[in-house]
Amino acid sequence: MGDKKAVETIYKDNFNMVQSLVINNNGSAQEAKDIFQEAMIVLLQKARSGSFELNCQIKTYVYSVCRRIWLKKLQQYNRYTNEVESMVGTVPIEEDIEEYEKRDQEFAMMEKAIGSLGEPCKSLIEAFYIQKRNMQDIASQFGYTNADNAKNQKYKCLMRLKKLFFAQYKNGK
Amino acid sequence: MEEIQLIEAVERYIRGEMKTDERVYFEQLRKTNPEVDQMVVEHTLFIHQMNEVGELRKFKSTLNEVHTDLAEKGLINSDRLKGNAKVIYLWKKYKRVAAIAASIAGITTLTISLLVWSLSPKIESSQVKELVKEVKGLKTKDQELDKKIKDVDNKSEKKVFLNPTYRYNGTGFMIDSKGYLVTNAHVVRNATTVVVQNKKGDNFNARVVFTDFAKDLVILKIEDDSFKNLTSIPYGISKSSSDLAESIYTLGYPRNDEMVYGQGYLSAKTGLNGDSLNCQITIAANPGNSGGPVLNHNGEVIGVLSTRQVSADGVVFAIQSKYIYAVLNDLRKADTSMKVKTPAASSIKGMDRTQQVKKIEDYVFMVKVN
């Protein structure tokens, strides 16, 4: 996922532009970094969607996405003092951003669910499902006497996590 | 089967780790037992989400690594900018306050000057005038600063692209058939290249010859060997304000390929908060319409379509056409070699709308900016 070399190239060619955009429009360097990284995720999701067809330069695309996301953020923070908007045309990116926001929400649900598990459940679940390590390994790291005990504990944690996640997921839908 | 074993089976099934006969048996179980089936569906979704979260986390850490790495190598100006950015940020944050303070200072100075002027014998009044202009300038500059997005990456903009694509597009229209056009300043802001395209799709290189950010207007000149002077411009440019309810129309390029016509009426003689630079019109306008001509039924340009209100629908603002003359005057003062001859009067008065538009089309251009 996300070839590092490619990420580096895109990062190098576009970050300064986005940083200028954000800083010149009521933002900080940290916010510029966040916005840019969000745009990178949008780009990645678009690239992985299968229907990836870019009708403009990556630079134009990244700029348009960042501009849109940043305007939205400014409106949320009420830092957006503009009452009028100019009617200059940019690349259409609304759909990609909507898709991104939808998935971002789902990610947030899962992260929140994992976050509210508490230890050692959190680490146990992450080790098995995210880092994809085997049960033997996990058992010895967490100090279980055997893999079966670790599996049992993992099962209990999993049940709790699923309950937490699906409660949010069904509410969100 | 106990639930713990069932979950394990489901996971192995999702990961495709089951042997053929085991999978056949499991699929049979799914068919006959709706509870198991539901469990598989639910767990697939769950595992999928977990995988996505894992990959997203990985990608985010890659991004952070790359950021730190590039910043250390000095390939992006992150750390270097931090101090600088803070100052700019503070300035952005407090610029309103600063502008208000400056305005108050300006007004105070103005009042004192006026007082001095009225109490003292006749002196040149140029000083007072200049101050008035300055205060007004400050106010408009503040609005102008707020107006739109700015892109200042000079370094990467200087790159030459073999197949150029354009960041922005707007509309512009001719004011002298020798190749002078007018459009909004915000359309060409920070441009390295400006290209105008006519209805037929021919592209011409153009140069910004004069910018007035306060009025949000620029004068462009086509400088391209393939450009041939057009016949005289059919529309006039109105010097006076228009009347309420007057029927108006516009031509522009909100679509990338084709000119779009829109009609409406003049709704107010001023812009937002009594802004006398603009007038308010009710018309369907979209991104890309910026810089387009707003014409009345006599075929006179009464304004330059520029902005719309964010919080309301169909509230559009156009810069009053008399300011085109003001900008041209400034241009003449700044550069006497520029002899822009505006059309004397509308030659399409009395024609029906379709005929008027046919005559005008060739004089309205798409403005592409890189």
Image: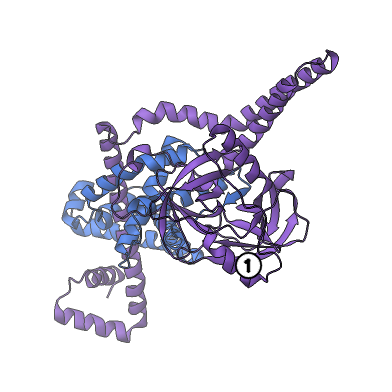
Task: Classify residue B98 as left or right of residue B12.
Answer: right
Residue found at the far right of this picture: B119
Please tell me the colour of chain B: purple
Task: Classify residue A92 as left or right of residue B219.
Answer: left
| SS type, badge 1 | helix
Which residue is rendered at x = 16% and y = 55% of the image? A136
Task: Classify residue B230 as left or right of residue B344.
Answer: left
Q: Quadrant of residue B315?
A: bottom right
**Label 1 is found on which chain of the structure?**
B
- Using the image as rendered, state which of residue B286 and residue B79 is in the foreground: B286
Residue found at the far top of this picture: B120
> Is any part of residue A76 visible from this angle?
no
Q: What is the x, y in percent for residue B104?
A: 71, 25
Name the residue that disc number 1 marks: B356
Q: What is the x, y in percent for residue B347?
A: 66, 61
> Is any part of residue B240 visible from this angle?
yes
Which residue is rendered at x = 71% and y = 20% of the image? B127
Q: Quadrant of residue A128?
A: bottom left
**Chain letter, blue:** A
Which residue is rendered at x = 50% and y = 44% of the image? B149
* Amino acid type of the residue tagged 1 in the rendering: Gln
- Using the image as rendered, state which of residue B195 and residue A156 is in the foreground: B195
Task: Classify residue B219 as left or right of residue A143.
Answer: right
Q: What is the x, y in percent for residue B65?
A: 27, 41
- Using the image as rendered, state which of residue B113 and residue A51 is in the foreground: B113
On screen, B78 above or below B31? above
